[in-house]
Image: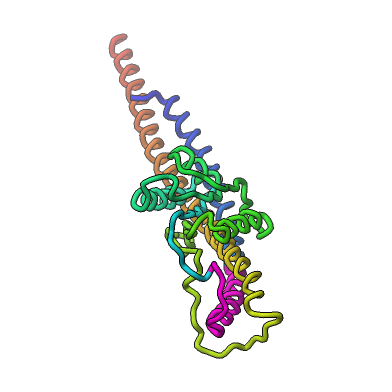
Amino acid sequence: MASLRDIKGRIDSTKKTKQITKAMELVSASKMSKAEQNAKAFVPYSEKIQEVVASIATSNMDASHPMLSKREVKKTGYLVITSDRGLAGAYNSSVLKRLHQTVQENHQSTDEYTVIAIGRMGYDFCRKQGMPVAKSIIGVPDQPNFSEIKELASETVQMYIDEEIDELVIFYNHYVSAISQEVTTTQLLPITNIPHNGSSSQYEYEPSQEQILEVLLPQYAESLIYGALLDGKASEHAARMTAMKSATDNADDLIGDLTLSYNRARQAAITQEITEIIGGVAALE
């Protein structure tokens, strides 16, 4: 049995760990609330730009753009969104597992695909697995602005326009609730899921619909990347909050078990001392 000093040391160290995990839980809860607000605040812009794109694409069948039409897929681009730090439960591993499975099922050679990594965990994973990484960004803030990922988003969309890749698929964790995140795989390019609103256009276009599409479609695709990043950040903070809460609860359980062991050991030591005293008194008599 461990000595009283050893058990007491483990109790003290576990209490200190509990304080750290509790603080991290509270910090993540605060960040999650802000990230959730950011994600919700971005939705109206995303819906409006989708409405305008849908209006042009559906009202004028002559309006065309490479981003709206499918072509033979010779090379696929995978954009994966992960965090820069761990301690977030299965947040990173679930996304990276989905990416790895997709690559294994669909590709025989690294020439058939490339990865665009947002986040250190995804970048490091792809490097260790020997996956080609075309572009990456590390150190994205907890509450990112579009300007901080605009260059990467723009270059990624340009890769499709320049036919360096023939489709772009994004992997990220969709925020469902504070305790639920869902791994999501979405084809970003070509843009084929524009809804048909069934109503006539309410816009007048100048100089022409084709020229507007040239500017608007890349912006729309970039906005989808940014929206997924905001969604992923909310999921990251929620996952970290849940993981830290679980760690805090486990620390409480461990402290309880160690305290029980400490009391039993202390009781056994006291009983042993009393027995020795009684034995010594009896020997003197």
x then y, percent, for residue 266: 38, 28
For the point 31% across and 9% down, the residue is 284
Q: Is residue 138 visible?
A: yes
15 left or right of 142?
Answer: left
Q: Residue furthest top?
A: 284
Residue at point 39% right, 23% down?
3
Name the one closer to the observer, 97 or 282.
97
In the image, is residue 62 part of the stretch drawn in magenta?
A: yes
Q: Nearer the viewer, residue 225 or 139?
A: 225
Is 249 on the left or on the right of 232, as rendered? left
Q: How many marks?
A: 0
Query: Does residue 30 appear in the picture of this structure?
Result: no
Region in magenta: 40-67
Instruction: Residue 279: name its quadrant.
Output: top left
Q: Can you say which quadrant of the picture contains the N terminus?
A: top left
Q: Is residue 117 above or below residue 68?
A: above
Q: Residue 135 location, x and y as percent?
A: 57, 48
Q: Magenta span has 48?
A: yes
Outermost bottom residue: 200
| Residue 244 place in picture, x, y as percent | 49, 48
Magenta segment's dominant SS is: helix
The residue positioned farthest toward the right in the image shown: 207
Task: Identify the colour scheme used.
Answer: rainbow
- For the residue pair 172 and 235, the one nearer the viewer reads as 172
The x, y position of residue 204, in whole percent, is: 67, 86
Q: Is residue 227 above or below residue 131?
A: below
The residue at the point 63 percent across, 79 percent down is 209
Q: Is residue 159 above or below residue 52?
A: above
Position of the C terminus, as image quadrant, is: top left
